[in-house]
Image (cartoon, rainbow, N blue to C red):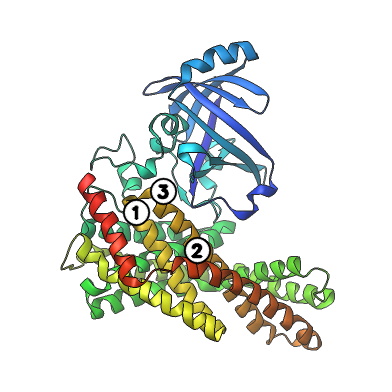
Amino acid sequence: MPSEIERKFLLPAAPDWLADHAATRIEQGYLAIDAGTEVRLRRAGEELTLTVKRGGGEVREEVEVFLGPGQFNRLWALTEGRRLVKTRHIVPLGDRLRAEVDVYEGSLAGLVTAEVEFESRARSRSFRGRKWMGEEVTGDPGYSNRNLASSGDPRHESPADGQNQGVDPERASRAYRLKPHESAADGLRRIAQGRAEKAAERLREAEGEETAEAIHGARKDLKKLRAVLRLLRADLGEKTFRAENHRFRDAGRLLSASRDAEVKLATLKGLEERFGGVLPVAPALAWNEMLRAEREAIATSPDDEIAAAIAAAIEQIEAGGARIANWKLKHDSWKLIEPGLDRGYREGRKALRRAAKDRDPASVHEFRKRAKDLWYEQRLLAGCWPSLMDESAKQAHQLSELLGDHHDLAVLAEDLDTRVGIVAERDAIRPLIARRQEELLEAALGLGERLYAEKPKHYRRRLRAYWRIWRRDS
């Protein structure tokens, strides 16, 4: 019986570029489901199949047979109540690998997963998820298609603590959202601890060509952790907040060099795509080669230098992580998080106004940081009202991406001023960078006006109402 070796990842949203890849609409229903076996019907385009799978997690056994339309339709009626619909996009990853990215519909709308199949366990173990893939959920039964079809979106479930239907407790404990039956204080400590542990794990496992991806993932984990710190700032006290925030910020900075080089290259590529017929070709190529050489110099720097930076970052992360369990928090429930939410929202509105007025890189970058805070806060509180909060978080993420692209162009413009070899062409390139920044800023300001439309007191009261209903119902 053939086996499939797969790993699954949970995407925060469908990437904008996904529509560029081949897609197939799939209807799927289940005839039988028990602890270790499933019998599945699938209509993928014109192809009709019946599949039996046994096992779970990374490795499963599978048998598949093709059906005629009559056979399929007679059996399909028996899957009532255990069905799902999704569109599958095939995304090449290189090195003979590809991701099957599923965008779900109906009651599962908003859920996006990516699954990668491997020829061997060794190949699976060596694979590092791409930065767009998000959290790994391999082995989490809540994200199996059979459970999605029968039980719905696991992000919206409210199981009692310790009753998560077989989900790996360590993985579940790292979910970046508060659970309904945990206190706010315990939940935020859990989330912060999970990000610290995950960042350190990524860095300990970093090696070879995947080092850059591991570093990027660790830096994202540290940003999420610092968002929790900002939410708890009032209860932690200014002294503790500053000490811990600086600790994790400095750990991230130790890892920044390789990422910065990669971002400049990607930003220049985006500029070339946007202004392909206008951007001077020769200087753009020369600039690209300079950036590539610098990236390679960083990537091929002595192993002991990279190892030293990673080791120093791990030491700081683990030192901070060890302190999280002892964070002294005065309040619990809504009183714990309300001051941080109020402060973050007020600062976001202020940053929006400043960015709209000044339109300079510093003010736009500050707005970006506050938009990211909003995105993380919406994710943490998604359980309050999943359909609404998930959509709000999606828009906050879109806003932070627009502002992030603006910031990357500002960094690229600074880099341009250092390039001796393309001095004559700077005056032709700078206006294109400024034009693209203006396009991004206009889109960001429009989205920001919608996200920050409420007065802070109304925003605070609305989320408090969601919270109280959620906690009462749970």
Q: Quadrant of residue 162?
A: top left
Q: Is residue 330 above or below residue 39?
A: below
The disc label shown at residue 215, or none: 2
- Please tell me which residue is depicted at 29% across the width and 38% down the height of the picture: 164
SS of the residue at dot 1? Answer: loop
Q: Quadrant of residue 381?
A: bottom left
- Residue 400 percent coordinates (x, y): 51, 67
> Which is nearer the N-term, disc 2 or disc 3?
2
Q: Are marks 1 and 3 in contact (CB under 8 Å)?
A: no
- Residue 408 percent coordinates (x, y): 60, 74
Residue at the outermost left position = 330
Mark whose residue sits in front, 1 or 3: 3
- Please tell me which residue is depicted at 42% across the width and 75% down the height of the picture: 349
Side (left or right) of 109 relative to 225: right
- Indicate the quadrant containing the C terminus: top left, top right, bottom left or bottom right: top left
- Who is closer to the viewer here, 257 or 152? 152
- Please tell me which residue is depicted at 32% across the width and 67% down the height of the picture: 458
How many numbered marks does the figure carry? 3
Q: Which residue is mark 1?
A: 177
What residue type is disc 3 on? Ser
